[in-house]
Image: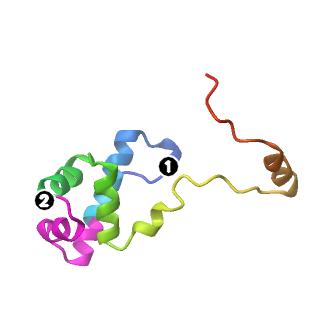
Amino acid sequence: MLTSIPALLTPPETEQLLAERFKTLRLQAGYKRTTLAARAGVSPASLKRFETTGQVSLKNLLRLAHALGRLPEFADLLAPQEARSLAELKEMSRQDTPKRGRI
């Protein structure tokens, strides 16, 4: 199994880590691939591809997470960082979010 130190994982390693975790969750729930695929509304082939290669569409990933009762974990995935101090909070409140990138 891969390490779970996020800062050191590459995108392919993260794909594989998620795939391994989903397979573990599926097996802990006692589901066959066909059962979870049906509950999630994805094809069994898509689920097999995800579990073996880590390749999955975002839509199917969210459907599978929902079928396993883990969808709420995605709500905080890309949330803005919280201020760690009053000074940081003040600085964050002064900064406007850009409407487009500059580079």
Is there any visible trace of residue 24 in the rendered image? yes
Tell me what residue is drawn at x 12 percent, y 53 percent.
45
24 on left or right of 2: left
Instruction: Evaluate if marks 1 and 2 touch, with contact meaning CB atoms under 8 Å apart.
Output: no
Q: Quadrant of the C terminus?
A: top right
- Badge nearest the viewer, 1 or 2: 2
Return the residue found at the far top: 103
On residue 44, the disc is 2
**Amino acid marked by disc 1:** Pro
**Amino acid marked by disc 2:** Pro
65 shown above or below 4: below
Tell me what residue is drawn at x 18 percent, y 65 percent.
37
User: Who is closer to the viewer here, 85 or 42?
Assistant: 42
Q: Residue 35: image x %, image y %?
A: 15, 71
Reading the image, the residue beneath label 1 is 6
- Judged from the image, the secondary structure of the residue bearing numbered disc 1 is helix
Mark 1 residue crowding within 10 angstroms, few (<14) / some (14–19) / many (20+): few
Colour scheme of the rendered structure: rainbow
Tell me what residue is drawn at x 25 percent, y 63 percent.
23
97 on left or right of 5: right
89 on left or right of 76: right
Is there any visible trace of residue 1 in the rendered image? no
> Within the image, what quadrant is residue 41 found in?
bottom left
On residue 94, the disc is none
User: Who is closer to the viewer here, 8 or 44?
Assistant: 44
- Judged from the image, the secondary structure of the residue bearing numbered disc 2 is helix
Q: Main secondary structure of the magenta part?
A: helix
Q: Residue 82: image x %, image y %?
A: 70, 57
> Within the image, what quadrant is residue 84 found in?
bottom right
Q: Which residues are magenta?
A: 24-42
Is residue 39 shown in magenta?
yes
Gap between marks 1 and 2 measured at Cα: 29 Å
